[in-house]
Image (cartoon, rainbow, N blue to C red):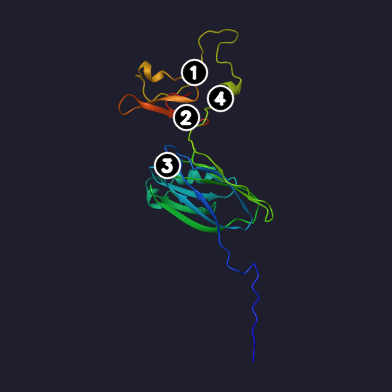
Amino acid sequence: MFVTCVHFSPSNAQVSPRQIEIGVIPGGLRYNVTQFEAAAGEFIELTLDNNGLIPHNWLLLQSGKMQDVIDAAVALGGSGLSKDFIPQTPDILQRITLVQPGKSISIQFRVPEKTGDYPYVCTFPGHSNLMRGVMKVLGKSDKVSAPLTETSSRRLALDALGRSKVQPFPEGTREKPYIIRTFMPEPDLGPEVLANHDRGYVAANYNPGQGKDVPGIALTDQGLPAAIGV
């Protein structure tokens, strides 16, 4: 009689992936998870749950390659939609194709063995400035913290002029500035549209289609002024 013994070790046993879910902040072009940690070589199942109003994708990238991938996605031009706005480049490590509103897509993958920060981004046109985050890869034995989440698309607009220490007035005077930079949707704005101008954190919710304010406010984002939030 022959007896065959098989030894099952943790390395060859079936391992269930750790679940990571990323959603969309309602009313804002932002993922609700801006950072999550993972151990080197960890098995992960990541779900993009699109609870927003427009399609989004999710691309995990090589470190330092964010802008290269964004530029490549823009270069797709009119063919972008048929390609889910995902360019063909080795700088993309993992991808979730366009997810329609109310839908979700999941993928499973092994985390890179190399520790470091791996950015992720949505490359749907106009989304990449805000819709991004980072996967931080730790050592195999390091403790993984809970993901960093956000519930609001609101961000304080940075005072770029103040931080630059540039004097906006003719030197030594308080006369009218000789340099002003602002963002206007159209030249003939009524005074009510300017009500929140220069407050730095909210902008009148100007609707260029109607040519007037509409109820509510449009929140600015860090470093990116809204229509009047400069």
Which mark lies nearer to you, 4 or 1? 4
Earlier sequence position, callout 4 versus callout 2: 4
Mark 4 lies on residue: 160
Question: What's the CA distance linking mark 4 and mark 2?
Answer: 14 Å
The residue lying at 49 percent from left, 41 percent from top is 131
The crowding category of the residue bearing disc 2, from other C-alpha atoms within 10 Å (few below 14, some 14 to 19, many at least 20), is many
Please, what secondary structure does the residue beneath circle 1 have?
A: loop
Where does label 1 land, which residue? Answer: 180
First of labels 4, 1 by sequence position = 4
Mark 4 residue type: Ala
Question: What residue is shown with label 2?
Answer: 220
CA distance for labels 2 and 1: 19 Å
* 78 horizontally vs 182: left or right: left
Asked if the residues shown at circle 4 and circle 3 are in contact, with their CB atoms under 8 angstroms apart, the answer is: no
Name the residue located 39 percent from the left edge and 27 percent from the top edge. 216
Return the x and y of residue 179 as percentages of the image width and height.
Answer: 51, 17
Q: Are marks 4 and 2 in contact (CB under 8 Å)?
A: no
| CA–CA distance in space, label 4 to label 3 | 25 Å
Q: Amino acid at mark 2?
A: Thr
Q: CA distance from mark 2 to mark 3?
A: 19 Å
Q: Amino acid at mark 3?
A: Pro
Q: Which residue is mark 3?
A: 125
For the image, the number of numbered tags is 4
User: Are discs 1 and 3 less than 8 Å apart at CB?
Assistant: no
The earlier-in-sequence mark between 4 and 3 is 3
Indicate the position of residue 110 as horizontal and vertical percent values: 58, 59
Q: Is residue 185 above or below residue 87?
A: above
Q: Going from the N terminus, do you reach mark 1 or mark 3 first?
A: 3
As drawn, which residue projects farthest toward the bottom? 1
Between label 2 and label 1, give the one nearer the viewer: 2
Find residue 137 and report its horizontal and vertical position in percent. 63, 51
